Amino acid sequence: MIDRCGRNIDYLRISLTDRCNLRCIYCMPEEGIRQIPRTELLDTDEIVRICKVASELGISRIKLTGGEPLVRRICTPLVKELKAIPGICQVTLTTNGILLGEQLPGLMEAGLDAVNISLDTLEETTFRKITRRDDFHQVLKGLRAALSYPSLKVKLNCVPTFQSDEELLQVAALARENPLHVRFIEMMPIGLGKEFTARGEEQIKAVLEKEYGLMTPTEEKLGNGPCHYYEVPGFKGKIGFISAMTHKFCNQCNRVRMTAEGYLKACLQYQTGISLKELMRSGCTDQELTE
Ligand code: SAM
Ligand code: SF4
């Protein structure tokens, strides 16, 4: 799928649910969100059907996300089915890590290729302020579990908000001590994120370089997305930045997204798209779905 801008769309991000067991202040209101009735969510068969069609169109990598994908029980069996689709070479997960420790053995058996764990701070009190929950140690457990599988690629996502420079240094140091990449994601002004000021890449890079030395950009391709990475002296992993605001990357975009209700969107910033659920539930053929 080469689009009008010459971009090769080979990556599909699927949200399994809007629900979450955390309430990050930049993402979820304190009271949570409206519950989508289970029957309105795509089920495993529907997701697999879409992915089969998508793989024939050129999608080769799939990311499961949310909300929190691991609160949906279908996650592990789904990974297994997606991995069995010819043409799908990678299935990965983005999670807050809370349920990762208990589900990882099954996910690994199902063939999970990589996991991104979101953790904004290593200070328990700040974690509570950001997520409005007390699950800090559970997330650490999930992170340790992920690192115990040498074949699993692990990345850590951190959205800088009001963490101190010291906290950001601590998060970055996880890539010094462990074979994982730490990525700083610039706050995007979408949803509740609008209420926060993004701490830009240059500012954070300066903080890190002051402590850890000169960071050297690397051309090595380390993932499917818009993250660019730096090598840091003495670090096992790399430090990455996803800077939607200060370093626009629309020209490199390679993805389409699907909501938990089966609404296919070409871009995060627009509401326009098409309901694949309605199509499928009104009895469309695979040819119609492909179109
Ligand atoms: N619940 C999972 C998690 O937190 O990893 C998966 C979904 S979450 C929406 C995916 C990533 O988006 C997380 O790393 C989160 O920190 C980030 N995120 C959420 N709201 C954001 C915003 N307004 N700007 C930038 N990143 C955001
Ligand atoms: Fe949940 Fe992830 Fe949003 Fe935090 S960022 S509230 S963990 S969906």
Image: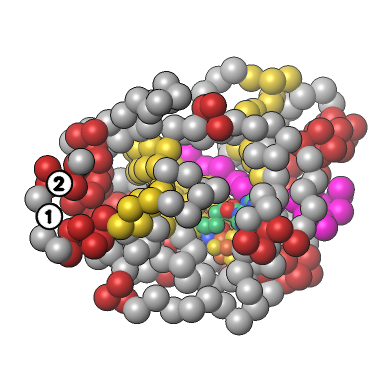
Secondary structure under the numbered disc 1 in the rendered image: loop
Q: Quadrant of ligand 2?
A: bottom right
User: Is residue 155 found inside the magenta-colored segment of the image?
Assistant: yes
Task: Check if mark 2's residue and mark 1's residue have beta carbons within 8 Å.
Answer: yes
Q: Say left or right for 215 vs 283.
A: right
Of 270 and 71, nearer the camera is 270
Q: Residues within 10 Å of mark 1 (few under 14, many from 20)?
A: some
Q: Residue at x 61, y 69 (%)?
A: 28
Of 124 and 131, nearer the camera is 131
Q: Residue at x 34, y 64 (%)?
A: 261
The span shown in magenta is 148-168
On screen, residue 226 above or below 47: above
On screen, residue 87 above or below 165: above
Give the alpha-carbon distance from disc 2 to disc 1, as whole Å: 6 Å
Dot 1 corresponds to which residue? 284
The amino acid marked with disc number 1 is: Cys
Q: Looking at the picture, how far across and down is residue 113, in whole percent?
A: 38, 41
Q: Looking at the picture, how far across and down is residue 264, in whole percent?
A: 35, 51
Answer with the quarter of the image where residue 41 lies.
Answer: bottom left
User: Is residue 140 found inside the magenta-colored segment of the image?
Assistant: no
Q: Looking at the picture, how far across and down is residue 22, in whole percent?
A: 59, 71
Dot 2 corresponds to which residue? 288
The amino acid marked with disc number 2 is: Glu
Of 203 and 3, nearer the camera is 3
Q: Say left or right for 91 vs 45.
A: right
